[in-house]
Image: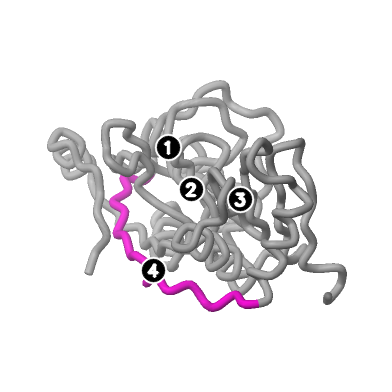
């Protein structure tokens, strides 16, 4: 066990957290996703749901079917035999209209970084992003891969409402809002993609391990995409 990891901790009386590291990096996250996939393909009786995070997997179970201590032992054995995730990462091109009503922080952030808005847009849209986890709200995507020059602390005072689809920056993370709500992130644009739609077979558009590339679009194209009910699908 290196540096005390992995470790399995109780979260109340019906969930366990399988922590693989205290570091936030792609290799750790890939192991989290591999464990989630293994438990999905070969379930353990009593496990009801698995939720991947940056560095840990939350395992919900039915305590009437399985004791937590027993489940912890089974999970530890799964970790010993863990193979890389078999799934192939999906790639999404995400259209973004930068600035405007949803990109409230674009100009201020550009000035803070000593670049023009166009330069910031080019830097942001020129990077490749990884979905590390879905959380906070249904379908909300936490992204790694934000260029270091764009790393920026969150706002001191959160806004009370930010629209669905808003493209955010918070610290060294990037994000895409799934539903409208309060937020302290800095927002530079919006996508017409619907990240969360309860009417879909899979309500959340993204999942942990997906890859994203942002594509700037103008207001007319964004409006047309939204009018056509664009829901998004992986690119080839």
| Mark 2 Cα-neighbour bin, 10 Å: few <14, some 14–19, many ≥20 | many
Q: Are marks 3 and 4 in contact (CB under 8 Å)?
A: no
- Chain-order first, disc 2 or disc 4: 4
Q: Position of residue 188 (x, y in %)?
A: 45, 44
| Residue ID for mark 1 | 178
Label 4 residue SS: loop
User: For the view shown, which residue lies furthest in the right direction?
Assistant: 3
137 falls in the magenta region: no
Q: CA distance from mark 2 to mark 3?
A: 25 Å
| Mark 4 Cα-neighbour bin, 10 Å: few <14, some 14–19, many ≥20 | some
| Mark 1 Cα-neighbour bin, 10 Å: few <14, some 14–19, many ≥20 | many
Q: Are marks 1 and 2 in contact (CB under 8 Å)?
A: yes
- Chain-order first, disc 1 or disc 2: 2
Residue closer to the observer: 186 or 139: 139
Of tags 2 and 4, the one toward the viewer is 4
Judge from the rendering whether residue 45 lies leftward or rightward of residue 179; answer left or right.
right
Residue 146 visible in the displayed image: no
| Residue ID for mark 2 | 141
Q: Are marks 2 and 3 in contact (CB under 8 Å)?
A: no
| Mark 3 Cα-neighbour bin, 10 Å: few <14, some 14–19, many ≥20 | few
- Chain-order first, disc 4 or disc 1: 4
**Which residues are drawn in magenta?**
81-98
């Amino acid at each position: 066990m290196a540096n005390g990891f992995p470790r399995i901790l109780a979260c109340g009386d019906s969930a366990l957290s399988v922590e693989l590291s205290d570091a936030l990096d792609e290799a750790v996250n890939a192991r989290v996703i591999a464990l989630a996939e293994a438990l999905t393909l070969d379930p353990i009786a009593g496990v009801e749901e698995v939720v991947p995070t940056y560095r840990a997997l939350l395992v919900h179970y039915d305590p009437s079917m399985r004791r937590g201590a027993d489940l912890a032992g089974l999970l530890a054995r799964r970790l010993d035999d863990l193979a890389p995730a078999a799934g192939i990462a999906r790639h999404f091109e995400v259209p973004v209209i930068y600035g405007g009503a949803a990109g409230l922080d674009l100009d201020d952030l550009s000035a803070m970084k000593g670049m023009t808005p166009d330069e910031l847009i080019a830097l942001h849209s020129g990077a490749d992003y990884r979905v590390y986890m879905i959380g906070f709200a249904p379908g909300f995507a936490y992204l790694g891969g934000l260029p270091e020059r764009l790393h920026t602390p969150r706002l001191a005072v959160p806004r009370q409402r930010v629209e669905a689809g808003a493209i955010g920056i918070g610290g060294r993370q990037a994000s895409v809002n799934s539903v409208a709500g309060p937020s302290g992130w800095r927002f530079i644009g919006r996508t017409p993609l619907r990240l969360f739609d309860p009417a879909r077979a899979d309500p959340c558009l993204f999942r942990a391990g997906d890859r994203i590339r942002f594509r700037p679009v103008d207001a007319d194209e964004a409006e047309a995409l939204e009018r056509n009910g664009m829901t998004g699908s992986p690119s080839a």
